[in-house]
């Protein structure tokens, strides 16, 4: 089929890239996912959604059919001068880099399936899941927001940062009517001013607000820029790059590994959370965690085991199976689903479509609870609740009534937990790196006091 008006085309089947999975499975939280108006005569092969991301100088808009990715760039007024006739398409170059299109994904799937019977069994329903090569600055702050969190709330937080702290780049129509404003991701300088932490707390960031401001301040003076400083870690050895990330406020092993994998060119890194641990127990011979939960030794054991199975692109394989853990995609069979988002479009002047020859040939990489004490005897019998009625606050145990009022994690700095920070002998930071709630266990170095926070498991987009 011909490209939509104003779009160019890249011949790329869903087996190489599934936009509707990759852009919604906990890698990047900045994309806007917009349903398109229904066709009067749908064929089942036309695009159903548009995906938009605001860069520093343009808005990138994507659609996907069963054979092609369609793209266009929208620039703020006044539009830049047209490039020379033989100049490369800068938006196409960005797409090739961001989606790492030089890597042949079906070849990786085949290599993993040969080496791993569990992957061979699970992956056919999850085609086209490749790792993004994101801007390290936006990726870092996104995964600081992800700690003890789930995808829909992380997305709201990450979208709130440009909405509050970046100027409007352009305004553009939505596919179904109306318009929306688009802002690029803010610079560190915008997130270090007076009142930023207080405002972020008002917006629902909780304890993460301190870490966003602290990390922004730590990177603000880097030369030539914070983005360039982080991007330079792509050329650093893995231990050096990891140590540089761990030195930043609010960054523990899991957040660091997510940033390494998804923005700093470390495809063998396997971030481990409770769901990756469950995968390792179910399919790869790992034992369940003891009562004390995840420890640094267990974290390393899981990551090393999965690297042994999947080889130099182990982080990519983990991303595929992780997506299968999300309820949004657990029954996915390659078809596109639906999730509404907040923003935007109108056609530009038509552009000539690109042929299949305009996409470079893929390179084939080588894939080689705290212990419960005795239950106190109640002073008087508690009335048995009526199972047909919802519980009232007075019918709940006191601890549950208290937890119902506010989140443990988001009030941790209001009391004793405020004195147990990430600088106090971090036992292991198990904040959610890819959108799932889990357990955080810290040990205070000064008083030797342990604090364990347990959170309800949350999976996928709510």
Image (cartoon, rainbow, N blue to C red):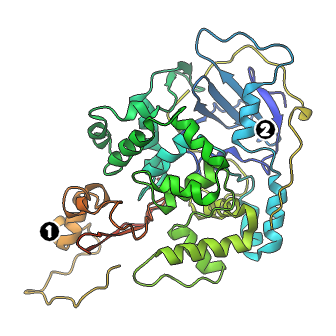
190 and 42: which one is in front?
A: 190
Tag in front: 1 or 2: 1
* 362 lies left or right of 388: right
Residue 359 sits above or below residue 373 on the image: above
Q: Position of residue 232 (x, y in %)?
A: 62, 43
Residue that label 1 marks = 394
* 137 lies left or right of 316: left
Q: Position of residue 83 (x, y in %)?
A: 77, 14
Residue 17 sits above or below residue 278 on the image: above
Q: Position of residue 397 (x, y in %)?
A: 19, 74
The residue depicted at 78 percent of the width and 38 percent of the height is: 43
The residue depicted at 75 percent of the width and 72 percent of the height is: 121
Residue 173 sits above or below residue 224 on the image: above
Looking at the image, tell me whether mark 1 or mark 2 is earlier in sequence order.
2
Gap between marks 1 and 2 measured at Cα = 56 Å
Residue 374 sits above or below residue 93 on the image: below
Task: Label 2: state its secondary structure.
Answer: loop
The local crowd at label 2, few if under 14, some if 14 to 19, many if 20 or more residues have their Cα within 10 Å, is: few
Q: Residue furthest left?
A: 379
Residue that label 2 marks = 43
Q: Could you tell me how many numbered marks the image carries? A: 2
Task: Label 1: state its secondary structure.
Answer: helix
- Quadrant of the image occupied by residue 456: bottom left
Residue 285 circle label? none
The residue depicted at 52 percent of the width and 57 percent of the height is: 243
């Amino acid at each position: 089929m011909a490209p939509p008006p104003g779009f160019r085309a890249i011949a790329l089947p869903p087996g190489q890239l599934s936009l509707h999975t990759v852009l919604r499975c906990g890698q990047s939280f900045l994309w806007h996912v917009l349903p398109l108006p229904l066709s009067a005569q749908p064929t089942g092969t036309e695009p159903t959604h548009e995906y938009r991301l605001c860069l520093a100088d343009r808005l990138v808009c994507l659609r996907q059919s069963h054979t092609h990715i369609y793209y266009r760039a929208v620039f703020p007024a006044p539009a830049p001068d047209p490039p020379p006739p033989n100049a490369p398409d800068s938006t196409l170059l960005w797409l090739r880099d961001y989606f790492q299109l030089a890597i042949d994904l079906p070849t990786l799937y085949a290599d993993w399936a040969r080496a791993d019977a569990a992957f061979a069994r699970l992956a056919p329903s999850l085609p086209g899941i490749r790792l993004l090569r994101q801007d390290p600055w936006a990726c870092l702050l996104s995964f600081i927001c992800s700690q003890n969190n789930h995808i829909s709330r992380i997305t709201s937080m990450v979208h709130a940062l440009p909405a509050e702290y970046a100027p409007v780049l352009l305004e553009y129509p939505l596919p179904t009517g109306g318009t929306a404003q688009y802002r690029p991701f803010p610079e560190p300088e915008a997130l270090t001013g007076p009142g930023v932490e207080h405002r972020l707390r008002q917006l629902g960031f909780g304890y993460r607000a301190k870490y966003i401001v602290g990390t922004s301040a730590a990177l603000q003076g880097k030369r030539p820029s914070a983005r360039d400083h982080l991007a330079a870690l792509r050329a650093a050895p893995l231990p050096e790059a990891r140590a540089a990330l761990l030195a930043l406020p609010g960054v523990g092993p899991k957040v660091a590994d997510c940033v390494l994998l998804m923005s700093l060119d470390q495809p063998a890194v396997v971030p481990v959370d409770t769901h990756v641990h469950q995968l390792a127990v179910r399919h790869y011979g790992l034992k369940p965690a003891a009562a004390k939960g995840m420890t640094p030794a267990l974290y390393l054991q899981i990551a090393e085991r999965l690297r042994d199975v999947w080889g130099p692109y182990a982080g990519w394989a983990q991303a595929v199976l992780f997506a299968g853990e999300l309820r949004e995609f657990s029954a996915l069979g390659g078809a596109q689903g639906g999730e509404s988002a907040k923003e935007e479009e109108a056609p530009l002047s038509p552009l000539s479509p690109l042929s299949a020859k305009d996409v470079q040939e893929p390179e084939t990489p080588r894939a080689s609870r705290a212990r419960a004490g005795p239950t106190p005897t109640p002073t008087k019998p508690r009335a048995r609740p009526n199972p047909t009625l919802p519980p009232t606050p007075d019918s709940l145990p006191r601890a549950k009534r208290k937890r119902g009022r506010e989140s443990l994690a988001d009030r941790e700095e209001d009391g004793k937990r405020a004195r147990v920070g990430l600088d106090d002998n971090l036992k292991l930071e198990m904040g959610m790196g890819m959108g799932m709630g889990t357990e955080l266990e810290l040990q205070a170095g000064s008083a030797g006091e342990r604090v364990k926070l347990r959170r309800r498991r949350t999976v996928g987009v709510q």
